[in-house]
Each structure stands twice: as structure tokens, then as C-alpha cells.
Image (cartoon, rainbow, N blue to C red):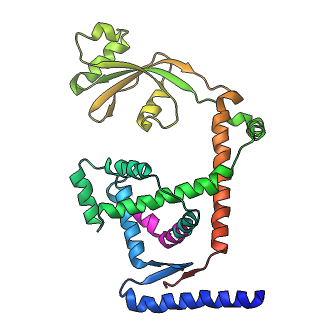
Amino acid sequence: MDKIRAEISRLLVFGFMFLILGFASVSFGQDKIVAIVNNEVITQKDMNDFANFMRIEFQGEYKGDELEKKIQEMRQDLLNKLIEDRLILQEARKAHMGVDPAKVKARIDEVRSHYPTDVEFQKALMQQGLVQADLESKIREQVMMRDVIEKEVKEKLSINPSEVTDLYNKNTSEFKSLELRDVQAVKIQDEAKVKALRQELISGKSPDTLAGEYTFEVDNIEISQNKEFRPEIENAVFKLGPGELSEPIKVDQVFYIFKLEKVVPSRQLKLSEVQENIHGYLFNIKMKEALANWLDSLHKHSYIKITQE
């Protein structure tokens, strides 16, 4: 009896898939089906809409050629991404995952904030053949996917304190602070006077005594070689000896002169100083592995057929 039931179930599944493929040629017209994921189809329009949606999201972070490069990189694996998203959404629906409207609104507001005005935002949507309802729908799906991943994967992970200690003890030499340089930064906009100001400072005059002759600003900052500052600034500062001044460095129509006040050498960091970072590092590793395993399981237990050539 069990074998008969299994065979009937198998025939029903394949019969359903046959109906989908047959129905597609009649009802979808030019909207070609590119993949089937269980009982849902992914069409060429789905792929185009998703690419347009990602363009709207990316425009806040990337511009011009950089934006186009990002879109092309995303397109290379677009179908696999859509299949993966469809599997996750199906799991979310099985789990009856609700969507917090506040999360959707917050994400829409974030995307909109990348545009100078709401008119520009609506114009960008129109250029991609989208309306705000399309954006809301995609973001609702994103929120649903994140929530089900949180429930099915992230919440099941934990890091034992001994794992943190073990990694620290095995890699102690890796946990050192960067060398810091305390510098005095003099900012001046007048290009005609910047060299004269530097000479005055080299001669030993303090910024306070020069305030009446020049218009400038002074700030004390810490600089390390962690790419927080522009490369030309880091390079100039790390060539200085104590008390030395850099050549004027032009940044966005403003000139900076740096004076090295003190060098704070690198030191060994204690476990208490880095345990939070180590915990995050270990958690991310486990998260990637667990997510990959979960997705692999979804693939193995699903019917997936790619129909595009």
C-alpha cells in the first residue's frame, strides 16, 4: 500500500509539472519560464524585475560605472539567487512567518534616503519600470527571508567561551594594537599662504601666536594605518619623526599640515579587549556554514528544474 501511495504521489508531482510547462506556453506568452521551484515558476520578467529592484537599492551606494559593474556582477548569478530566494520564501510561508510593517517601512525609508528628494526617488523607480508597491513587495520578501533565517539558523547557534579563549591562545601574536600617531593637524584654505604658514611653524612658532596673521583651524587627532584616512595622509604622517611637519596635503580644496606629536607603539592586546571581536568572528564562521547546510538541505528536498538554455 505504501509503494502504491508513493507512486501516486510521484505521478501527481510530475503531472503537475507537465501542466505548468504546458500552461506556460499558452498563458505566459513572451514571458518565458526560466525555472521551476517546487510548485512555483520563475520567469524572465521575475529576473528583469529583480535586477531593476537591485539597481534601485545599489544606487544609494554606487554611481556611474561602479553601479553598472555591480549590476553585471549580480546578473552573473541572478537565476541561482532567485531560486535560493524562492526556496527561503517557501520555508517562510510554511512557518507562517508574519512581516513586521515597521521593518518594511524602515527599509523603504532607508532606500529613499539615498535620493535627494522624493521626486528623484519616484523618478528612479519609474526608470526601472517599478512603482513603490513593487519596492514594498520586494522588501517585504527580504524581511520575511531574514526572519526565517534568523529563526531556522541563527537562533540555533551558540559560541562557547572556551572557543573564544582557545582561538586567542592559539593566535596570540595576531592580537596586537596598531601603532598610533598623535598629530596636530593644521587646516588652511588659502593656497597662497599655506607654504608661509608651514615655514612659520617649522621655525618654532605655535599656532596660537600665528592666529592673527593667518586664518586656519587646528585639531589634534590619532592616525593609524587602518585606511581610515586617505592614503596620502597616512603615508605622510608615518614618514614623520617626532616634532616634524609634513608638506601641505591638498584634500578637497583644503590644505593640511601635520605635525607628529607622539608615537604610541603597538602592544599585545589582552583577551578581555578582543573577546567580543573573536566571538563575532567565530559566530560568522558558524553562521555561514550553518546557512550553507540549511540551503543545501532545501535544495535536496525540493523539485528544481532550470528550463532556460
Residue 280 at x, y = what percent?
Answer: 63, 42
Lateral position of residue 169 relative to residue 67, left or right: right
Q: In the image, is residue 246 above or below residue 302?
A: above
Q: How many labels does the image show?
A: 0
Residue 284 at x, y = what percent?
Answer: 63, 48
Residue at 41% x, 73% y: name it. 46
Q: Does the magenta stretch include residue 80?
A: yes
| Picture quarter with the N terminus | bottom right
Lateral position of residue 66 relative to residue 293, left or right: left
Magenta extent: 70-85
The image quadrant that residue 63 belongs to is bottom left
Residue 155 at x, y = what percent?
Answer: 64, 50
Name the foreground residue: 102 vs 63. Answer: 102
The image quadrant that residue 137 belongs to is bottom left
Lateral position of residue 127 relative to residue 177, left or right: left
Q: In the image, is residue 60 above or below residue 216?
A: below
Name the foreground residue: 88 vs 188. Answer: 88
Residue at 39% x, 48% y: name it. 106
Lateral position of residue 193 relative to residue 187, left or right: left
Q: Is residue 78 magenta?
A: yes
Q: In the image, is residue 36 above or below residue 54?
A: below
Residue 118 at x, y = what percent?
Answer: 24, 51
Please tell me whether the stretch drawn in magenta is mainly helix, strand or loop. helix
Q: Quick check: can you spot residue 54?
A: no
